Image: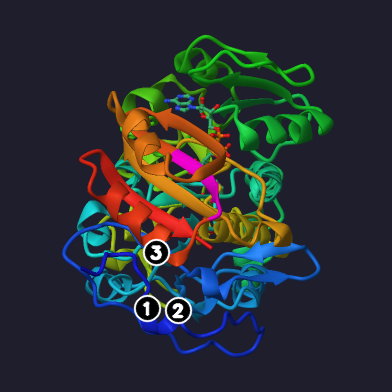
Amino acid sequence: MASPRDISRSSLSEPASHSLSASPAATFTSPPASHGSFLAGSLAQRTATAAAKQLKPFNTGDIKILLLENVNQTGRDILTSQGYQVEFLKTSLPEDELIEKIKDVHVIGIRSKTKLTAKVLQEAKNLLVIGCFCIGTNQVDLEYAAQHGIAVFNSPFANSRSVAELVIAEIISLARQLGDRSLEMHRGTWNKVSAKCWEVRGKTLGIVGYGHIGSQLSVLAEAMGMSVVYYDVLTLMAIGSARQVPTLEKLLEEADFVTLHVPETPETKNLISTEQFAQMKNGSYLINASRGTVVDIPALIKAMRAGKIAGAALDVYPNEPAANGDYFLNNLNTWAEDLRGLSNIILTPHIGGSTEEAQRAIGVEVAEALVRYINQGITLASVNLPEVTMRSLTLDESNHARVIYIHRNVPGVLRKVNEILAEHNVDKQISDSKGDIAYLMADVSDVKTEDIKEIRDSLDSLSSRIMTRVLY
Ligand SMILES: NC(=O)C1=CN([C@@H]2O[C@H](COP(=O)(O)OP(=O)(O)OC[C@H]3O[C@@H](n4cnc5c(N)ncnc54)[C@H](O)[C@@H]3O)[C@@H](O)[C@H]2O)C=CC1
Ligand SMILES: O=C(O)C(=O)COP(=O)(O)O
């Protein structure tokens, strides 16, 4: 019986194609009822990248990839150069269209907008791996993906500097009311004022979440003569003269500028709400370039109308549109009109990580992780599967197969797997677990096409199996 992630035998009889330009026609088995195994090649097809002296894993032209949300050209080039079939869209998709498209693909690449919920992922019967071409992975049901053997990769810090620089710009812009002055000039009004405009030198910046972005920002802010305090759920080493404070309340009491750099979690939902605004200094400023759910926006509107908060910069919103255009926030959020009517508020369309440098670096990092996973089964830097790596097989090892067995982490599995592999020569084997998911990789030598089928079928029959892949 055909297995869910099998590529059909008819396509396997064609030679592997790795051309840059053409997407080879590939035949796929129709989507089966449940997740299962992935046979990615036959022994007859073994070929190699001459330069790298590495074995090509299978007919890469059979792999279908859907890239959404304008993933950078660098990433697209890396994926197409492998010979994969790459479909590219500039926007994210509404849920019904996403469900239709995801049914067919082995790989999906997204950014922060596309919600890969359990409802969507359960339709993705062929899906092997998700690439988040961004930092945040809150838009993906990571647990569901792990339980179904779908690896998830992201780019943990390639856009951190871009976000930190945007925040620096916003600190000065808010202190000098630059947004309002510029708008007035655009409307033809000359309004030269110094009242309630400040230097940032000597002021205190409070950073909530001292991770990649928060700590980078700390360095830049100190260089401008600011004092830095930070609050984090972890005890973290201070950079420069920054100082960790024990509670969020303490930070809010001390800071002239509060900036948020936490992930979206149940704990960070409405982290800054009415009570927290009351704890902030009179005339202080709030910046949110983390996730829209972290700030209670109606409470912010009230605090700004009351003059408690002198200015704010928001880059992220609880509901964001799928594509660029003349939407505005009003269609998605009831408070949008009130927000737009406030003074000294900078509203940007989630551009914290949107620089050429960041997008190029993310494209390369995530695409390379996808290629390593698709071709070699390497899970290094995966956010939801155990990290397992083995070196690539070389041309001299053309009679090898790489067996990947993703399984429930229950007692006795290794014994059963080794009984299956015992008939062959296992050159290398490595296995690791993360929670109740385990990942095993073994390189087996002197195997024939029939052996591969037998190994795969035997592993598929084990009750612990989540997914089996046999490469080469
Ligand atoms: N606006 C934009 O374009 C971008 C937004 N982001 C957002 O920024 C967030 C932060 O990014 P990174 O600094 O790279 O993440 P990170 O994971 O390096 O740092 C997050 C820090 O927040 C801390 N934290 C978690 N929960 C907390 C809580 N309840 N209270 C206080 N601290 C808490 C963590 O311990 C960690 O130190 C991302 O999760 C993403 O949502 C990231 C990149 C671009
Ligand atoms: O990297 C992140 O988490 C971001 O928020 C940036 O998202 P984007 O790639 O601009 O959709």
Amino acid tagged 3:
Glu
Label 1 beta carbon within 8 A of ligand 2: no
Q: CA distance from mark 3 to mark 2?
A: 14 Å
Amino acid tagged 2:
Leu
- The mark found on residue 450 in the picture is 3
- The mark found on residue 12 in the picture is 2
Please, is residue 379 above or below residue 202 in the view?
Answer: below
Q: Disc 1 marks which residue?
A: 9
Check whether the beta carbons of the residues at disc 2 and disc 1 lie within 8 A of each other.
Answer: yes
Amino acid tagged 1:
Arg
- Magenta residue check for 445: yes
Determine the secondary structure under disc 3: helix
Q: Residue at x 31, y 76 (%)?
A: 101
Q: Name the image quarter holding residue 363.
A: bottom right
Alpha-carbon neighbours of circle 3 within 10 Å: few (<14), some, or many (≥20)? few
Image location (x, y in percent) of residue 313: 53, 47
What are the residue bounds of the magenta stretch? 440-446
Q: Residue at x 41, y 55 (%)?
A: 469
Image location (x, y in percent) of residue 50: 78, 71
Determine the secondary structure under disc 2: helix
Image location (x, y in percent) of residue 42: 48, 70
